Amino acid sequence: MKRIRNLFFSALLALLATTGCVNNGTGTTAGSSSSQSIADSTSATQVAKPKITDTISIAMVGDVMLGSIKPNYCMPPNDGKEIFVDCASILRGADVTCGNLEGVLADKGETRKRPGPLSYSFMMPTKSVQLLVDAGFDFMGIANNHIFDFWKEGTLSTIQTLKDAGIGVAGTKDCETSIREINGVKYGFCAFGHEEYSLRTQDTATVKRVVTDLRKQCDLLIVCFHGGSEGTSARHVPQGKEYFHGMDRGDVRQFTHMCVDCGADIVYGNGPHVPRAMELYNGHLIAYSLGNFATIGMGISAQVGYAPLLVVRVDGNGKFVGGKIHSFIQPGRIGPRADAQHRAARDIWSLTQEDIKDNRLIIADDGTITCK
């Protein structure tokens, strides 16, 4: 059960709360199996914000791909029931939990990609969504380079499957944002990628519109993004645009700062498949990449196998209070496992010191994050 106390919403708003996806300001609804719900965007603008009287904890992870049934079969043992065994208590213990779904949730369809050494497609069976529910995920971003692996039918199946399971979803033109009311607090969630079929980090006008509009409808705003180059050679956050095999992957420093300037409370990234530095910008935390987290069947050697689980505490204004990087590692097809060597946290600390000018964070060996 998510743990926000001393919060109160009117009974009328509780009756109006629903679950769904907000697209260009219009809400659609679906049933939810939990006490968490998504508030209708119209009523959200008419009701005063509740006063948040306690800190809020936000758990975030990078890429999640729970095994693929197409085009090649590669599923975890025991239907994946042990994937999150080492980390579920942390994921469920946060007030809100977010990730990036690297692939589609569907049971049929043909890949749009031609076979080749750099051609990867991922189709998770729709029943896999229960693993996300059981682990405690509240939001999943889908703005990445695999959400269109099985054409638009795969994308729409993913959106509907997540919504039916009560998980907020955002990141494509079919589903721009999600607003969920969880224990009296309205969380806004949006996601951006670098592909044409997602909301793009490079589309400044759309980024500003989406973040600014969402800010008006929620109490705490979380932005997920898929950007930057890939692999162990892409661990550092450069200045300016990044490219991977000639493709524009965006300017992640400019994008993340713009999101905070437009009202985002926290911004976290994925895409490079390795962890990257963190930054405190105007009091708000930016995690430039949380790398892979649970990517069954993908190459997971060296830093690509690091699986950080970031938990951040913010105050009522969304400002960073403290946090911790829980270090996990992927030893094979079984999912993230606790890492007593704290390699992910130590790597992120090293990168933060190297890449962030005037860094204001301190990350201890055990992953505890404080301000200087």
Image (cartoon, rainbow, N blue to C red):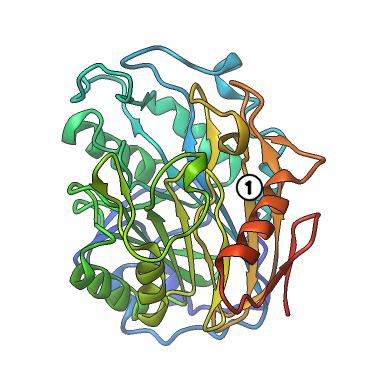
Looking at the image, residue 372 sits to the left or right of residue 64; the answer is: right
Pick whichever, 77 or 28, lies toward us.
Answer: 77
Residue with the mark numbered 1: 308
The percent coordinates of residue 66 (x first, y second) are: 49, 28
Name the residue at 27% across, 51% down.
194
Circle 1: residue type: Pro
Can see residue 189?
no
Name the residue at 55% across, 18% down.
76
Q: In this view, does 92 lie above or below 319?
A: above
The percent coordinates of residue 156 (x first, y second) are: 23, 39
Can see residue 242?
yes
Q: Quadrant of residue 225?
A: bottom left
Name the residue at 36% across, 26% down.
122
Q: In which quarter of the image is residue 264?
A: bottom left
Badge 1: how crowded within 10 Å, few (<14), some, or many (20+)?
many
Pick whichever, 371 or 189, lies toward us.
Answer: 371
Q: In this view, does 53 lie above or below 162?
A: below
Q: In this view, does 231 lie above or below 36?
A: above
* The N terminus lies in quadrant: bottom right
* The C terminus lies in quadrant: bottom right
Q: Is residue 197 above or below residue 254?
A: above
Pick whichever, 366 or 173, lies toward us.
Answer: 366
The percent coordinates of residue 88 (x first, y second) are: 67, 41
Looking at the image, residue 177 sits to the left or right of residue 51; the answer is: left
Count numbered badges in the picture.
Answer: 1
| Helix, strand or loop status at disc 1 | loop
Q: In which quarter of the image is residue 19?
A: bottom left
Name the residue at 33% across, 17% down.
70
The percent coordinates of residue 346 (x first, y second) are: 72, 52
Looking at the image, residue 287 sits to the left or right of residue 343; the answer is: left
